[in-house]
Amino acid sequence: MPRATPADTDAESAHARRGLAARVSLGRVFAPVPSEFLLIASTTLLLTGFGLVMVLSATSATNSGQDPFDHVVKQGIFAVIGIPLMFVMSRFPVSFYRKVAWPALIGATVFQLLVFVPGLGVSSYGNQNWVQIAGFQFQPSEFLKVTLALWLGAVLYRKRDLLRSWSHVFIPVVPVGGLVIATVLAGGDLGTAMVLFLIVLAALFFSGVRLRIFILPLLVAVVAVAGFAFTSDNRRERILSLFTPDSADCYLTTCYQSLHGVWGLASGGVFGLGLGNSKEKYDWLPAAANDYIFAIVGEELGLIGCLVVLVLFALFAVGAFHVIRKTDDSFVRIVAGGITVWIVGQALINVGVVLRVFPVLGVPLPFMSQGGTSLLSVLLASGVLLAFARSLPARQEPAPPRTSRSSRASNRSRPSRAEASSTPVPFDHARIPG
């Protein structure tokens, strides 16, 4: 029998190492994920599916001869693209997002500037914030939300030891953040600008900045919002109409949409009129599938359907805030905080608009409103949260209780139950009766 040569031994060991590496890599793919990952992923999928159903219902009433499935098919295309992208992004390490923060924000800002290019930019309802490319209409400001959160996390992470100084906090956060928000305000979209400002405040809060540093940005924000609101006659009248909620004097002017949204919710009652049986969607409620889709949910599925939507967003927030609380990485904490405040805060703003708590701001309901760009952006942001959930430190098993030296010695001298049962007992002949 021929002996094995050293070359054969090396080849066998190399093959074994490759097999071991393959098994280790396969084990990482199928490794169990944290409960936060499952909670965020499941609520995201449920909200997206629920949104597709409601978009189909809200857009099925058409009198223009258009295919009633046209809108939901376009929304479904973005969902089919965004959901796999979400899980692909969940596989990237945290260091990847830290490296791409600057290029991503620059690319999203350039994309936003395309709305001002003649032939590409599209104006709607007085806002210049859409781009028409290859038959699809995009809203570039939606991508600014996720990229701004990543950029703020990268910048504040690098300055984490210098955040006690207000100059290091404001530079470059205020100039760059102000420039990004200005590109949106230039198109007239005040609602999206307010959401971007919320992301900035959330990032500063979760970075551990002193609270007194927030005073100046808040004052600037209040003055800016008041200026943009009251310099426009339409915005000013919509805000003032909130103080007369029981009056229909503005029905034909500024509160037509708001009143029909409330009437849709009221007509649904507890159990709703039934899926597909909305009356407001028949050209009574403008933007029924967009900003006012929550009103269609309340009309068709009633209070129960609205509570289901709110509970799903609450569970999403619970999973995201668990990531923020458990992580040891300040970059993860800042970005996850900004994304969570953006998605949950925007949902609360949208619901508040439908309930006439806030004026009409043109802010969609995340995951559910019609709009492929909005859906794609929140799915990408959810993918970032899922990647952060994978990076959470493993839970440590509790250590066994320590015992004293004397108790260990007594335990060593005391026989175990098995030893006691196996030890023969001496037979006492004197106990046998004679």
Image (cartoon, rainbow, N blue to C red):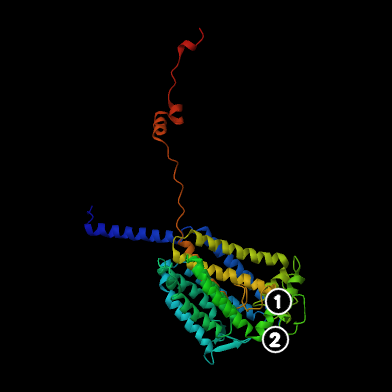
Q: Residue at x 43, y 18 (%)?
A: 426
User: Mark number for residue 65?
Assistant: 2
Q: Nearer the viewer, residue 17 or 175?
A: 175
User: Mark number for residue 402?
Assistant: none
Q: Is residue 328 visible?
A: yes
Looking at the picture, which amino acid does disc 1 mark? Answer: Leu
Distance (Cα) linking label 2 and label 1: 37 Å
Look at the numbered disc 2 and give the secondary structure of its residue. Answer: loop
Q: Is residue 275 above or below residue 229?
A: above
Q: Residue at x 51, y 87 (%)?
A: 114
- Quick check: marks 2 and 1 in contact, CB under 8 Å? no
Which percent across, then down, holds residue 179?
A: 49, 81
Q: Quadrant of residue 320?
A: bottom right
Q: Nearer the viewer, residue 251 or 211?
A: 211
User: Mark number for residue 242?
Assistant: 1
Q: Quadrant of residue 136?
A: bottom right
N-terminal of the pair, mark 2 or mark 1, is 2
Looking at the picture, which amino acid does disc 2 mark? Answer: Gly
Q: Is residue 387 above or below residue 292?
A: above
Which percent across, then down, holds residue 347?
A: 61, 70
Q: Is residue 15 above or below residue 105?
A: above
Q: Quadrant of residue 303?
A: bottom right
Q: Is residue 82 visible?
A: no
